[in-house]
Image: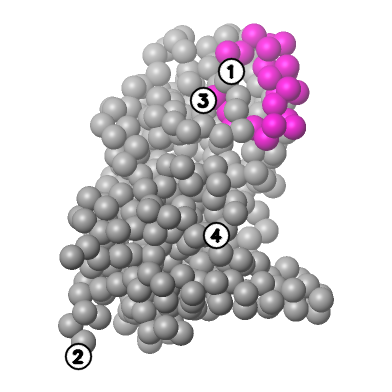
Amino acid sequence: MSKTVLLTAGGTGGHLFPAQALAGELARRGWTVELATDERADKYGTAFPARKVHIIASETIRGRNPLLLAKTALRIFFGTLQARKVIKALKPDVVAGFGGYPTFPPMFAARLTGTPSVLHEANGVMGRANRMLARGVTAIATSVPIANLPADLTAKLEETGNPVRDAVLQAAELPYEMPRADGEFRLLIFGGSQGARFFSDLLPPAVEQLPAEIRARLSIVQQCRPEDMDRVQKIYKEFGVRTECAPFFQDMPQRIAQAHLVICRSGASSVSELSVLGRPSILVPLPGAIDQDQAANARVLEKAGGAWPIREADLHPKRLAGEITRFMNAPAMLREAARNARSVARPDAVKRLADLVEKVAMKQGERP
């Protein structure tokens, strides 16, 4: 008899992509997969291997305004009622959450209904939503070791790694192609909405400062917000730089695999994919984050010698132009960084996480 899992994740790629990887693996093992998320998941939903996507109300905590806090509490309460109704109808064998505030109602509803649950923490620092949920779950899967947790949470930890999508594993079969001296240099730039805006402001003036012979070699693929697209492309065109810009690339794993150098934020999924694909990168952690989780993620690749993290405050056009020039003139250094990045990869993470989910469901099934 097929078992059922209810996956829940925030509506961004960083949360949904690991959930998508687990969904694919569990489906191959004969599980029925359902997804609970928020309305932001629409652009990913068609590719998500779930029987049904349940849109659950949720809200993040913003500031200390009493009215906003009351609104947030009502949304979470309503979302929890929605999620409880879904769980009562589905009777899933296990609920698995991947972080982000939309996971709170389904994971809390799992606790209220006595449904076993697995919480996956992708970052090197546990996020706020996951910290609030951690004590009520059956098991906690981590991508990397997490220090300074209370003993009752440490007992629940199992390090599985961060699952990557099937498309990433397929693209990882392509070996890193070291750039040839005086040949084309493929530069890939991407980030979330905030990252895309920052890079759209940073890259064009940096390219402007490059020597003409360096610009002539560049081939840029860049994620841009729709409102930034025209001005970014116009500047690249003025300087004769080959470029392709889009708000979102469905084939991002293939794009990363084809790049000689990647410039991006250091979200957990990005760092995991860069390591599995084995590609060198300049990482720009999101500033202002309460837990500095992206800085912790970046240090994993930096320690391995596979990436060069630079704080956003320290990265201006002149410096970036110098970094791009330096790397374009040091192909052997890029090849070594690609090898180092792959050394910390966990391509089996999805299988390890699926094993943990099945173990949690099996223990529940053995109870009298």
Cα distance, mark 3 to mark 1? 9 Å
* Residue 59 pos. (x, y %): 65, 67
Q: Nearer the viewer, residue 69 or 171?
A: 69
Marked residue nearer the N-terminal end (1 or 2)? 1
Cα distance, mark 1 to mark 4? 37 Å
Marked residue nearer the N-terminal end (3 or 2)? 3
Q: Say what amino acid the circle numbered 1 marks.
A: Thr
Question: Label for residue 187?
Answer: 3
Asked whether residue 302 is in view, the answer is no
Which region shows up in magenta?
A: 221-242
Q: Which residue is under mark 2?
A: 368
Where disc 2 sits, the SS reads loop
Q: Say what amino acid the circle numbered 3 marks.
A: Leu
Q: Nearer the viewer, residue 311 or 161?
A: 161
Q: Residues within 10 Å of mark 4 (few under 14, many from 20)?
A: some
Q: Residues within 10 Å of mark 2 (few under 14, many from 20)?
A: few
Where disc 1 sits, the SS reads strand
Work out whether 311 lies above or below 318: below
Question: Label for residue 243?
Answer: 1
Count the labels in the image.
4
Q: Which residue is under mark 4?
A: 55
Marked residue nearer the N-terminal end (3 or 1)? 3
